[in-house]
Amino acid sequence: MGNNQLKSFIRDVPDFPKKGIVFKDITPLLKDPRAFREAVDAFTEHYRRQAVSLVVAAEARGFILGPTVAYNLGAGFVPVRKPGKLPYLRKKATYQTEYSTDSLEIHEDAVRPGDRVLLLDDVLATGGTMAACCKLIESMGGQVVGCAFLVELTFLGGRKPLGGHDVFSLVQY
Ligand code: AMP
């Protein structure tokens, strides 16, 4: 199964969660054993030789792929969550997405100087979410090895706010 076949497992949902947004629903891909394995293997293969020490991903959909890829890479997993969810001392970043303004938090001791961090999410839209995550990681002394996505909406130019970071996506629109 190639990346073009993966595309057939991604469902367009018009006007969700707001009018004018075409939501890329990855649940059909997650449900299909071959497609799910293909996607996880593609991320693992791409980063296998990069000595990733931590995979960091934001809720909610980042929590599905993030730990799976971390397990395969022999890396740890660090959650990034909406405000008020993490129990311990936190660092916060505020950012814009394709359809909202939002904040995310990470535990302040979750990333250490020298950590090699892979950031993972389902969709790259405007890049605001991922840029905020990169800033959090770098403010803690971590090195961003890559920003990886199942889906990249190229027409929204999400690579730009990610500056010089390595960006890898499995499926592009
Ligand atoms: P952005 O910060 O604009 O790149 O938005 C990325 C975040 O919002 C990701 O966590 C996605 O899960 C979600 N998102 C934004 N646009 C879409 C879309 N069209 N379909 C599905 N998820 C999206």
Image (tube, rainbow, N blue to C red):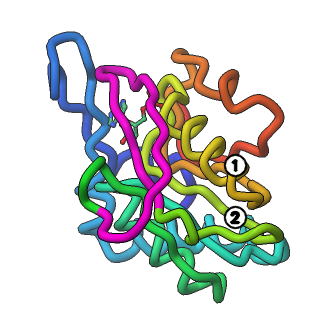
Q: Give the quarter of the image for residue 65.
A: bottom left
Q: Which amino acid does label 1 sit on?
A: Ser
Q: Which residue is drawn at 33% across and 76% down?
A: 33
Q: Based on the picture, tell me whether residue 91 belongs to the magenta stretch.
A: yes
Viewer-proximal residue, 105 or 42? 105
- Image quarter for ligand 1: top left
Horizontal and vertical percent position of residue 121: 47, 51
Task: Kindly state the secondary structure of the residue where label 1 is placed.
Answer: helix
Residue 91 to residue 156: above or below: below
Question: At 66% from the left edge and 24% from the top edge, which residue is drawn?
Answer: 161
* Residue 137: % across, % down: 65, 54
Task: Specify the principal SS of the magenta part.
Answer: strand
Q: Label 2, secondary structure: give it.
A: strand
Q: Which of marks 1 and 2 is in front?
A: 1
Q: In this view, does 169 lie above or below 22?
A: below
For the magenta stretch, what is the residue range?
A: 86-106
Label 1, on which residue? 139
> How far across and down, in percent of the image, does residue 77 sit?
52, 76
- First in sequence, mark 1 or 2: give its number: 2
For mark 2, what is the residue? 117
What residue is shown at x 32% (from left), y 64% (from top)? 86
Q: Does the magenta stretch include residue 18?
A: no
- Where residue 61 appears, as percent x and y from the top left, is 33, 55
